Image: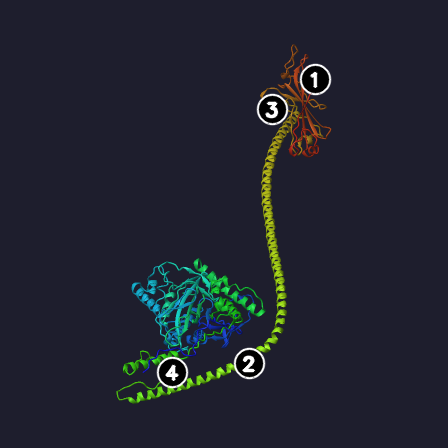
């Protein structure tokens, strides 16, 4: 029997280099679903009511801020579908996530993220429980159920660290598998190492979860392709991206942050992230649990295990077609189709007054709220650009969360969101904000991509044909009836010539019927092949004839085109002229645009300078006001200080003047007392010793008895004061007698001395014997001066004996005493003796001619 080697089918052609294309002619809105968490306690009050499968009505409770502000209206929100509390995980998965997995198998990207306040059930919806898995484990089950028989061997696809994959040969893949096996024996598994690492607080709180796989759901896939699944797991913590599967960071205390980059196809990815190739759902879930133990989770007042970061679990499906024989993967990187499904568990928004966060937890809450606010701002601007036709820049780079998923919102995939809400009345204020965000998100339109796979021209079903051929070949070799060493068979043609091969199992040596049947079947297939070949030859002949006909027609067309060529040349010249004019016009437009841009730059520069100058002027005004206020305060302080000092000085001066006035008043009172005492003694005709009697007239009595208001200053020129005079008189034995002009002289005075014992005068009598011991004489007179002030004059003299045996008075001194009013003195501002507060201390001393009075003794 003739031997053959396999050869490619006649219809095969080389792969094209077309890039992955998308149909951007249609748009779909972001699909938003709502899932209501069951009430945790029976005593809790609900503020939500489901009125239809797509609509929720929210009523404001009395404890809410809207109720206190007087806003009692109900809020109605519509979603694509509302999941009531008794809806299970399977229904949520089939409705929301299963269509995204179908897109993943077809080569399209998808994004699914959960959004809501803390403690609303986001992580439960995404992960689930061991016996009731969530969206992520169910997605892994469906993917591996669908590609179970079509997976490539490990390390056939290898990440190139640039968000792409390389195709390795079977030899290189086998070498990598051996290295991995050897490394597995030499080093412990990363999961065990991470669980034993010190400082990993989450390793004990997240034990390995044993789950049951769901093998009931299978999606149709392309049988002539091979598939490989890679997973990555990152978290966005405090606006930094960390790789939760990085084996190099296991031995260190803290993870190293990664950067977000853009690949050659404008897709965003985390640079140097760990991509783990998994071969089963259990292995993928184990990798997820390994990263989950390193995720940051903390206790708050509202949630015992609150997520402190946004987690992104990405499933990447790599598929490539088999060669024409249906055995090996085509060693061409351009034919690889990469699709991914990103499952995002967003951290819940928090209010500090409810969570009671402080320190590090407060900083985490602030970063979580900022990233969610940036996501909301991006969607709002994107919606505004779509609805109003504006071209505002979307701030994707303000947050790592929005920067990482920029290509999804720009149209590279399908986006879905599950809004998890807690119907408790205590969460009403936060839930309202979540509902507003969900309502706004549904208005955002995302371009629907259509993946176009490369058509390599290979015969469909070559994998199955190769399998059948190998089975038949092996059976024939066992029977030793066919030498298959150099068998050359066109498998594509064989597989397409008829139905399946007949039964080939031979149970005994006597089953010749089976061999006969197989020979007849093969003869039929050979006849069919010959018929097809003859038909092909006939078609080739017909095609040659058609080519000759077309050639003749082309010659005729060439003649016709020659005449039209001249006309085309003229048209080309016109077109060239128009193109030149267009180029000039475009150059002018470019020049005008440059001038306009320059003018705009100048305007912006001038505006900036104006703002800077306004700021400088405002700063100067503020500084001036500050300096003015400073000096005003200083002046006020100095004024108060000087006022206090002046008040103190004034009080001291007043006290000093009051003391002086008191001293003067005491002196005047003393003089008055002396005058009153002498006046009372003179009226009785008795000489008063050591006193001064002041003679008074009836008109002067009141003036002398009552002193005027104010201070009275008494001074004497070349004489001592009255107090000193009194002191001097108290030290001597002299006596003063009173003499008032015009008054009756009593008997026994100096003028009419009363002698006790009469005797003849033989010698000069001692004046003291006559005056009863008095040796000085004082005359007091009161009158008004030219200014109307009362003036008192004291005429002082000595008593001396006379030759007739009597006594005479010789006046040798006059002392003037003035009593002045302070108000009257203040008016005389030109007086030479004026002082502070109108007090005046004046002293006048007058000398007059000596007047002698003779007192003769009685005979």
Front residue of 784/568: it is 568
How are the colours assigned in the image?
rainbow
Residue ID for mark 3: 724
Residue ID for mark 4: 494
Rendered location of residue 594, percent (x, y): 60, 59
Residue 672 appearing in the image: yes
| Residue 152, placed above or below residue 776 | below
Q: Which residue lies furthest to the bottom in this view?
A: 513
**What secondary structure is marked by label 1?**
strand
Write down the quadrant of residue 191 in the picture.
Answer: bottom left
Q: Distance between the residues labelled 2 and 1?
A: 182 Å
- Marks 4 and 2: in contact by CB < 8 Å? no
| Residue 728, placed above or below residue 641 | above
Residue ID for mark 1: 852
Disc marking residue 553 = 2
| Mark 2 or 4, nearer chain start | 4
| Mark 3 or 1, nearer chain start | 3
Residue 415 appearing in the image: no
């Amino acid at each position: 029997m003739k031997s053959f080697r396999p050869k490619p089918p006649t219809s095969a052609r080389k792969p094209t280099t077309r890039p992955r294309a998308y149909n951007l002619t249609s748009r779909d809105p972001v699909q938003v679903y709502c899932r209501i968490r069951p009430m945790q306690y029976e005593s809790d009050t609900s503020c939500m009511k489901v009125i239809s499968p797509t609509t929720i009505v929210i009523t404001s409770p009395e404890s809410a801020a809207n109720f206190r502000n007087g806003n009692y209206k109900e809020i109605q929100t519509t979603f694509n579908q509302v999941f009531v509390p008794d809806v299970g995980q399977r229904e949520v998965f089939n409705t929301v996530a299963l269509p995204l997995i179908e897109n993943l198998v077809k080569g399209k990207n998808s994004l699914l993220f959960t959004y809501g306040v803390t403690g609303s059930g986001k992580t439960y919806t995404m992960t689930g429980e061991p016996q009731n898995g969530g969206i992520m484990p169910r997605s892994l089950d469906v993917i591996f159920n669908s590609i179970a028989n079509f997976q490539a061997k490990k390390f056939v696809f290898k990440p190139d660290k640039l968000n792409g994959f390389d195709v390795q040969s079977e030899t290189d893949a086998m070498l990598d598998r051996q290295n991995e096996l050897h490394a597995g024996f030499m080093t412990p598994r990363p999961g065990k190492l991470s669980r034993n690492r010190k400082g990993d607080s989450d390793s004990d709180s997240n034990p390995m979860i044993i789950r049951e796989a769901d093998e009931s759901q299978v999606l149709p896939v392309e049988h002539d392709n091979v598939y490989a699944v890679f997973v990555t797991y990152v978290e966005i913590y405090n606006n930094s991206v960390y790789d939760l599967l990085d084996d190099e960071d296991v031995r260190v205390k803290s993870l190293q942050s990664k950067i977000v980059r853009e690949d050659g196809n404008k897709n965003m990815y985390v640079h140097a992230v760990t991509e783990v190739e998994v071969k089963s759902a259990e292995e993928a879930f184990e990798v997820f649990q390994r990263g989950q133990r390193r995720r940051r989770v903390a206790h708050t007042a509202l949630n015992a295990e609150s997520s402190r970061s946004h987690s992104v679990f990405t499933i990447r499906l790599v598929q490539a077609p088999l060669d024409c024989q249906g055995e090996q993967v085509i060693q061409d990187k351009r034919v690889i189709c990469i699709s991914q499904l990103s499952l995002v568990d967003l951290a819940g928004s928090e209010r500090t007054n409810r969570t009671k966060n402080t320190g590090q937890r407060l900083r985490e809450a602030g970063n979580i709220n900022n990233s969610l606010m940036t996501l909301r701002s991006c969607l709002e601007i994107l919606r505004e650009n779509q609805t109003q036709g504006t071209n505002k820049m979307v701030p994707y780079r303000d947050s790592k969360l929005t920067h990482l998923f920029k290509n999804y919102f720009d149209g590279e995939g399908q986006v879905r969101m599950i809004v998890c809400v807690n119907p408790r009345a205590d969460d009403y204020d936060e839930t309202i904000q979540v509902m507003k965000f969900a309502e706004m998100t549904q208005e955002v339109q995302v371009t629907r991509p259509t993946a176009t796979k490369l058509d390599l021209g290979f015969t469909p079903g070559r994998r199955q044909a190769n399998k059948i051929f190998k089975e038949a070949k092996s059976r024939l070799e066992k029977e030793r009836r066919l030498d298959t060493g150099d068998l050359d068979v066109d498998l594509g043609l064989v597989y397409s010539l008829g139905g399946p091969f007949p039964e080939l199992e031979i149970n005994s040596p006597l089953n010749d019927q089976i061999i006969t049947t197989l020979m007849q079947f093969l003869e039929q297939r050979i006849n069919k092949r010959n018929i097809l070949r003859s038909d092909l030859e006939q078609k080739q002949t017909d095609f040659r004839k058609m080519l000759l006909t077309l050639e003749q027609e082309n010659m005729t067309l060439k003649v016709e085109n020659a005449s039209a060529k001249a006309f085309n040349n003229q048209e080309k010249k016109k077109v060239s002229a128009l193109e030149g004019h267009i180029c000039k016009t475009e150059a002018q437009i470019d020049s005008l645009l440059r001038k306009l841009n320059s003018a705009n730059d100048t305007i912006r520069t001038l505006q900036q300078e104006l703002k800077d100058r306004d700021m400088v002027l405002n700063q100067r005004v503020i500084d001036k006001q500050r300096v003015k206020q400073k000096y005003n305060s200083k002046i006020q302080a100095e004024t108060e200080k000087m006022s206090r000092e002046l008040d103190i000085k004034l009080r001291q001066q007043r006290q000093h003047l009051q003391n002086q006035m008191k001293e003067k008043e005491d002196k005047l009172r003393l003089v008055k007392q002396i005058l009153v005492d002498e006046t009372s003694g003179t009226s009785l005709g008795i000489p008063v010793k050591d006193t001064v009697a002041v003679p008074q007239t009836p008109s002067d009595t009141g003036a002398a008895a009552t002193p005027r208001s104010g201070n009275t200053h008494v001074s004497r020129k070349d004489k001592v004061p009255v107090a000193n005079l009194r002191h001097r008189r108290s030290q001597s034995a002299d006596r003063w007698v009173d003499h008032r002009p015009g008054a009756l002289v009593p008997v026994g005075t100096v003028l009419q001395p009363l002698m006790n014992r009469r005797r003849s005068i033989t010698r000069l009598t001692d004046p003291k014997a006559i005056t009863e011991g008095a040796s000085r004489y004082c005359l007091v007179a009161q009158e008004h001066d030219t200014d109307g002030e009362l003036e008192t004059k004291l005429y002082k003299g000595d008593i001396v004996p006379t030759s007739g045996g009597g006594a005479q008075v010789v006046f040798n001194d006059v002392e003037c005493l003035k009593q002045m009013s302070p108000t009257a003195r203040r008016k005389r501002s030109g007086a030479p003796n004026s002082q502070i507060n109108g007090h005046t201390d004046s002293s006048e001393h007058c000398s007059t001619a000596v007047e002698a009075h003779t007192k003769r003794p009685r005979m």
